[in-house]
Amino acid sequence: MLSGRKMAVLRWEVPLLLAVILVVACNAVHSDILYRVPEEQPPNTLIGSLAADQGLPDTGHLYKLEVGAPYLRVDGKTGDIYTTEIPIDRETLRDCQNLFGDKCFLEFEVSITDMVKGIGSGPRLIEGRIEVLDINDNTPQFASPILSLAIPENTNIGALFSIQMATDKDSGSNGVAEYSLSTGPDADELFTLQVALDTDEKLPQLVVMGNLDREKKDSYDLNIRVVDGGKPPRASSALLRVTVTDQNDNSPKFERNHYEAELPENSPLGHSVLQVRANDADTGTNGEIDYSLHQASETVQRLLRIDRSTGIIYVKGQVDREETSFLKFFVVARDRAPNSKSSKVLVTIIVKDQNDNAPAIEIRGIGLVIHQDSVANISEDMPIGTPVALVQVSDRDEGENAVVTCVVAGDVPFQLRPASESVGDRKRKYFLQTTTLLDYERIKDYRIEIVAVDSGNPALSSTNSLKVQVTDINDNAPTFSPALLEVDFAEGNQPGDRILDVVATDADSGINAEMIYSIIETSASRLFEVDANSGEVRVKNALDREDVERYEFHITAADKGLPSKTGTSTVVVNVLDRNDNEPKFMLNGYSFSVNENMLPLNPVGVVTVTDADKGENSRVTLYVEPDNGKFVIQNGTGTILSSISFDREKESTYIFRLKAVDGGEPPRSSYVGVTINVLDENDNAPYVTKPSNSSYTYLTPATPPETRVEVVEAEDIDAGPNAELQYSIIGGNPYNLFQISSTSGEITLAKEFSGKHNGLHRLVVKVSDRGKPPRHTTTLVHVFVNETKSNVSLIEALVGHSLYTPLDRDIAGDPNYDYSQHSNIMYAIFAGIVVVILIIIVVVVIRNHLKKDTKSGYQAGKKESKDLYAPKQGPKNGKGKKSKKPKAPKPTKPLEEEEEASLQKGLKFNLINDVNDSPRIHLPLNYPPGSPDLGRHYRSNSPLPSIQLQPQSPSASKKHQAVQDLPATNTFVGTGDNNSTGSDQYSDYSYKANPPKYNSKQVGDYANMTMYPRENIRWTNGVW
């Protein structure tokens, strides 16, 4: 190892400072050791020898590394400490970051166990630190490969301008050592470099050596190089771009040379820490200052930010003192002149502790006591005071918040003893040792709970536990319970039949509890034998009760401990000849599961029953009790068959019992309970309870997105996944205006309405369960979008019409609805007037034609003797008689009544009067002012204000079969009165059919009738 040390010295050209600082501890229990080693040493580099440094022999002791992995390893015999495959990098060690030249330490702990005295003497604990010395393993770097510097023209010769410094992760002599400047021919006589010292830092400054004229040349590119002081040195360079600007001759100056502040940990985001202030003697933009962080580590940049205008430093991230106890960085103040000047100041922020960390309890093995999965094993013969664990209690807080009290909770034979006499606030070590002798046979294991409480206000506590298993020694003899074993055995047995099992117990464990059985008497060994391992006693020959009725012998059990211990039992065998065993079911109770809808006479389950007897005594017959005909059982196989088909919704569980009777004299029987659980099948489709198909929801065009529109509620009488429902919109949503929650059925508005969305929207909602295969049902949700809902009759008419519209056609508003409605009414009025005028003209023409016919037989001067309009009478009895005086003709019916009668005669519905669940469209009789009188229009042009479709009508079964798979309880529910807009009043409404007035074709062309002009409701690309 000495040669390796010399090679390390030659390689790094620095001596390995292995001086040992030993602090002799009281009672030789604790010692502090300090080693020094350069970072990045190769594996297996010797750092120090604990045996040599402590004056301990290098034999008879076991050295074990407790703390220091994975960077260190310890030789178990000599206590030599070596480096490992993982190098020690000073710059990456957690405790060595942001030190700014302070020393870096790596802590270690080693336990020493005296192998001569044994584990009972207790181990020693050695604590130490390794100072990690910096080596030149990092290259100094500029913040950017291009550095910019602005210098005003006409600057005085000899003026100095600060250049942004380079940074080096190394420290001390390995840090930044010198700067150099390379200039081109055009700048050789204009610039030079000067390096100034400021708080142990080298500040590069550019010196102006000649006159600068911005009009001649406004920029110069120079090369600046930085070199550290390591051996060999490391260097890097950057491009320094000098821009000639207007004059700015004053640099900002901070009010203080060093700013310090305290920051409580866990401070909220945005909390102001401190304010740095700098002043600039210049005016205007030359005197305006911007602040920025300089040489700030990643931690500083993550936790803090600075207001560039005010210089106030704010909390940016979560501050945790346990991660970062202080923050050190520079703040640069730079004026806003084109040729800006800057200055910097050091800022130190101390993070103040709060009691936000509970004590940490670490339990680990010590010396030869190995812990695995929080379990320690210790022999029951260990002396009092034997350590079983090393307990380390620490608190990441500081001060009073880190003062921890540690105790063992509960009544257990263990206590904590300080492992060292150093009283550190943050970390204490204790030996967990025994206080009494342990007894495996009395208590085999202990659960030890250790409680630690800090001194904060309020105090925080934590617990940790260790299971201690007591290992056995052979200090107990086997025992039989009972010591006398008496058994009845039937005569006529076969050789080798089992008589009984003898069982001895040993309070010890492991091999000390493993036993060997043997028969003591030689005479008994001729008839009986015992299995040496299991203790099973068998008969060698057939026994005859008439020869010997009772046998008595002794069996001994000897354990395998050293030395072995034995115990003895007396066995008595009574030879009998009787049926002395009942049938026995394999289980105490049976539970089977079957699928519902299973066909009868299918197997449900199988039970197993045995009888220790033989022949007729072991032949078992099974019966079902009570025998209600639902189940039967097959004797011989034990198979239970069902006589029924199961329906879980009617009955989910069947409970009965089985009776087993053997064939002995007298017979013996036993019982067992049986439970049949019926598993659910997805044999029920969901059904919708809300809303009804004929209801609707009113929304204004200004309704914002995410507004709740309606909630579809459904139920499923199945169970489990078969009753878990999913909701989806499968039609009526071509513009994706609406969305539905797949789990709750809540329909919300997805986006804003536009002009084309005004009108009725019919959403086709599918409700599916999660069964395999799934079942589903469909329902309709109507949404009416308009500025007002004053014309309720029109809305209800639209809803009623949608019930007869096929589901594959989308009903999703009409952008020209209002305009088309008024236009169609005007067209209808005009068409009615034209029809009336045409009818009047036709009547007048016919009358004139009739008058001409009567005048064609007229003779001048001859008196007409007959009334042309009187009805002619036929001859009576073949004789002509003079006709009676004609009566005055009856007044003709008004034209409207004739048209009404003819229309009613031609328009007939194929209706069924006894069906009361068909939809009706109620037209209101009162309307708000200004609304079109659609009700009067419908009454004047439609012979009937309500329309009912029956399944027998062609229009209902073929052309307008709108909803084909909706459940009957929620399909085509009629609308309510003319003042209702909700859905509740429609759900239980019943109707009676009106007298038939329309034929089926007119029902099918409902939207094309005068009462419903084609311009008002039309199909465009499948959208209503």
Image (cartoon, grey):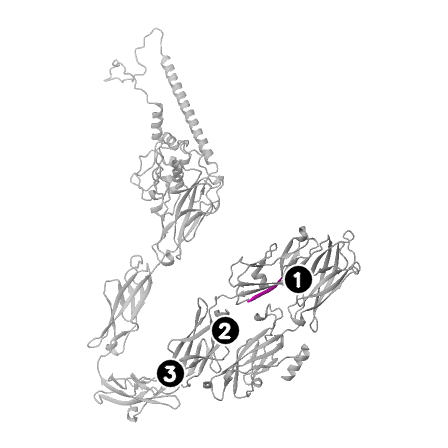
Which three-letter amino acid code belongs to the residue tagged 3?
Answer: Tyr
Q: Nearer the viewer, residue 508 or 386?
A: 386
Whichever of labels 3 and 2 marks the residue nearer the N terminus, that label is 2
Which three-letter amino acid code belongs to the residue tagged 1?
Answer: Ala
- In the rendering, at what x and y percent does residue 350 appear? 56, 65
Whichever of labels 1 and 3 marks the residue nearer the N terminus, that label is 1
Q: CA distance from mark 3 to mark 2?
A: 39 Å
- In the rendering, at what x and y percent does residue 857 appear? 36, 12
Q: Nearer the viewer, residue 580 or 816?
A: 816
Which three-letter amino acid code belongs to the residue tagged 2?
Answer: Asp
Q: CA distance from mark 1 to mark 3?
A: 69 Å
Q: Badge 1: few (under 14), some or many (20 or more) residues near its Cα, within 10 Å? A: some
In this image, 559 relative to 570: left or right? Answer: right
Q: CA distance from mark 1 to mark 2?
A: 41 Å
Residue at numbered disc 2: 425
- In the rendering, at what x and y percent does residue 753 appear? 48, 42
Foreground mark, 1 or 3, reads 1
Classify mark 2: helix, strand or loop: loop
Q: Nearer the viewer, residue 895 or 847?
A: 895
Task: Indicate yes or no whether the magenta region holds residue 442.
Answer: no
Whichever of labels 1 and 2 marks the residue nearer the N terminus, that label is 1
Classify mark 3: helix, strand or loop: loop
Q: Magenta region, mostly helix, strand or loop?
A: strand
Question: Residue at (26%, 17%) from the top-left corner?
Answer: 875
Residue 498 visible: no
Residue at numbered disc 3: 440
Question: Residue at (35%, 25%) from the top-left corner?
Answer: 896
Q: Which residues are magenta?
A: 325-330
Residue at numbered disc 1: 143
- Find out whether the residues at labels 3 and 2 contact each other: C-beta distance under 8 Å: no
